[in-house]
Amino acid sequence: MDFLNDFDPSDDENEFINKQKTQNYPPFSPNLHEKFWFRDVSKENQPATAINEIDLFRVGDLFDAGNFEEAENILTELSENTKNNRTHEIMLIDSLLQCSIQKENISSTEASTCQQLLSDYESLLVDFGDQIQFLRTKAPLLSKFPPSEQLKNEFKSTVALLCQLCGSFENWQLFENGSQFLNDSEIYGLKMKMKKVLHYEIEHSKGFVKEKLERKLKKIEEEEKVLEEKLKKEQIELILSSLNIHREIAFPESATSAEFRAHDSRSKSKLIPKSDQSTAVSDFFKRFPFFSS
């Protein structure tokens, strides 16, 4: 068995390693695109996923450039000519509506198209997060439609429902998009409620977020003084009383409240079905009587 002493099993391993070392691999070259590579790239012989990606990049580019009409054309083509799952369809519809929101005015014809898109959008909602995004898109869109009494009521009800679901400062602020639908008493009450929510959110914020909220609070306090000049003392007292402005209370409807944690955004239990929405809206106007429903 002496021959085993002459056998070194590492010889084969070393030979294998040496062969590996001698192999010539091409040098690494990162696949870098130019900043606006998608503008001129050809879509010929590209797989469907690549074509969609190119189109979506172009939509974002057009949106940033303010070319909303062309962005809408691409989005419409994607919606009509590609097979989309629910979340992708929501993304396309929401993007189309965001283009309309950016316009100065929306014609009656375009408003009808947007209403149909809103109806399609609403039919796709399945959870709390979907409904929040839908309402946050619907509210500013309605404020761009040709004004009417029916539109005023729909706008108020939309933001009311949103604030019932999640009463963050950003959601309350959406009432200001439809300021043409609000009288001085409503605007004053809105400012006081926003001020109240801001105090809470500032208390639970830090750094640049807190500084940004504090600047918003200062602006509201300046607007408050102007509005107080327009209202009677009795009106102001009634509004402040309805808000319990002098009490230190928690804000269960605030988005920063523990009731609405991040993981709850996909909770199906918090979606308000259409059959219950009128009750939720009615409850909102009872809680905040300075709004005329």
Image (tube, grey):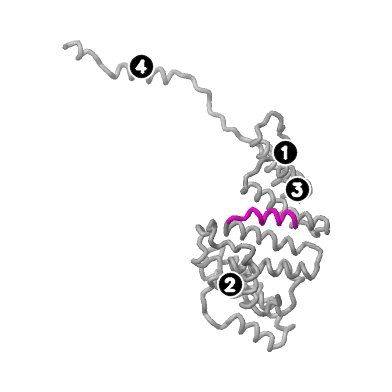
Q: Position of residue 131 (x, y in %)?
A: 62, 59
Disc 4 marks which amino acid? Glu
> Which residue carries the number 1 mark?
39
- Give the vertical position of 283 relative to 45 (above or below): below
Disc 3 marks which amino acid? Glu
Name the quarter where the N terminus is drawn. Answer: top left
Label 4, secondary structure: give it.
Answer: helix
Q: Earlier in the sequence, mark 1 or mark 4?
A: 4
> Which residue carries the number 2 mark?
197
Marks 4 and 3, Cα distance to the nearest angstrom? 63 Å
As rendered, which of 67 and 239 lies closer to the eye? 239
- Give the vertical position of 99 relative to 256 (above or below): above
Marks 2 and 1, Cα distance to the nearest angstrom? 44 Å
Q: Position of residue 268 (x, y in %)?
A: 54, 58
Name the quarter where the C terminus is drawn. Answer: bottom right
Which residue extends farthest bottom? 234
Q: Earlier in the sequence, mark 4 or mark 3?
A: 4
> Which residue carries the number 4 mark?
15
The residue shown at (75%, 71%) is 181
As rendered, which of 103 and 130 lies closer to the eye? 130
Marks 1 and 4, Cα distance to the nearest angstrom? 51 Å
As rendered, which of 105 and 216 lies closer to the eye? 105
Q: Earlier in the sequence, mark 2 or mark 1?
A: 1
Q: Earlier in the sequence, mark 3 or mark 2?
A: 3
> Which residue carries the number 3 mark?
72
